[in-house]
Image (spheres, grey):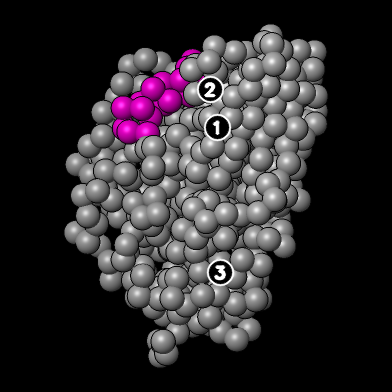
Amino acid sequence: MTYTTPITVEIANFIGDTNFDALPQNVLARGRVHILDALGLALAGSRTPATRSLINLARRVGGTATSSVLGTALRTSPPLSALINGTAMHADNFDDTSPQPSPDRNGGIHATAAVLPAILALAEEANLSGRKLTEAFHLGIELSCKLNHAIDPRHYAEGSHTTGTLGIFGAAAGAAKLLGLDTAGVAHALALATARAGGVRANFGSMVEQAHAGIAAEGGVTAALLADLGLAGDTDSLGNHFGWLQAAGGGYAPDAIRGRLGAPWAIVDPGTWIKPYPSGSLTHPAMTLLENMMREHGFDANTVDNLTVFTNQRLISTLIHNNPTDAIQARFSMPFCLAVLLVMGRAGISEFTDNIVNRPEIRAMIKRIVYRPYDAVETGYSNVTTFVEVTLANGATHKARADFPRGSPEAPMSFDDVVEKFIDCAAAVDWPADKIDQIMEMVEKLEELESVRYLIARLTS
């Protein structure tokens, strides 16, 4: 198909012209689930070393104290607030993942952790409503996801981390919407974002990767603010022959995004995964399988002789820490994620610590786990199809296959499921019970909230 409107202009028109009334009820319902999930993660993530480093940065450089750092009493500038809260949401690798719709592509994106902190910071500063926040959230998420579906697979395969590289565009779009920029202003904000979009997979398993979402959020806020102040860029900075999609990906598939923004909304089709475990989402099909097998057959680390897990090679090239030495690496380690389930019987935030990673029984179980690729991708496989084979000490064997994990659209976590996760995350920082109840009630009726400041007051100390 031949397209006459430049892609950046099409995107800017969509962001500028689409309002709350265009959001279907099922999209709004899923949005509330993902927002509650991310707010709980921000509370839990406020305690992590990566987040604390950024809090110290904010205290050092200062800024107009108009936006809050969740889980603390600190107020700072909107860009710094977005930087810190985005890092906190992603620090435990427990945040949602928007997948690729095609089985021959890898590279999901943690869009919420990039978009939500950006718009929270500006909505608090301007005293905007939950309805306005919701509108900007869905527009930002939609853009990040559709760009991820469209950009050439080379982008992720050769090392770019889409949460950083593409999350910034959703953050910039959502921020531009809240600032009331016209379509030209949105295009300029996207042009400014091209100058900041970055993040490489080499940092998986490090504190820098934990900050990718926050850096994208901060960049998006700054891009929108600069556009609002008149800093202009090329009108087609994304699709120009020398534009970002060509430079960063070698091109893109127009039919994956053109005419498809909001048609359908990516948050419901292909949907977004909520994580039941604080680790890379590519570990989750195997973890879901193993938990089910343990429950069905009654085995644990004491009765398992060895375990083999098979995935496609693309997953293996992402889960690069087969012998992790700390909790950050463990989140990108298939052997650890399965070993901790077998030894501890669960895999929550409290299990991903340096101490547990280096416990002798965990190290011993890791040595009995083999992670390898299957020979070929067969018809019917998804891009995360996983096989687990367990051999017990008595010689019995158990095998299982999963094409999707718990938390995916095929096995979704409901608002009530995420309430339980939110409570666990809040408990990690001893958050007051009365505030927990109020937060959940406000998010459940977010579009009716007169001011997001009421919600943020319950998320700060």
Q: State if disc 3 and disc 2 touch (CB < 8 Å).
A: no
Residue type pointed to by label 3: Ile
Q: Which mark is residue 293?
A: 2
**Earlier residue among tags 2 and 1:** 2
Report the Cα–Cα distance between label 2 and label 3: 37 Å
Residue under numbered circle 3: 151
**Earlier residue among tags 2 and 3:** 3
Q: Secondary structure at mark 1?
A: strand
Q: Where in the figure is residue 130, as x and y percent of width and height?
A: 27, 45
> Is the residue marked by circle 3 packed among few (<14), some (14-19), or many (20+) residues within 10 Å?
many
Residue 422 colored magenta?
yes
**Region of the chain picked out in magenta, as a range:** 413-430
Q: Where in the figure is residue 312, as x and y percent of width and height?
A: 65, 49
Seen at 76% across and 12% down, the residue is 361
- Nearest to viewer (mark 2 / mark 3): 2
> Quadrant of the rendered structure where residue 431 is?
top left
Q: State if disc 1 and disc 2 touch (CB < 8 Å).
A: yes
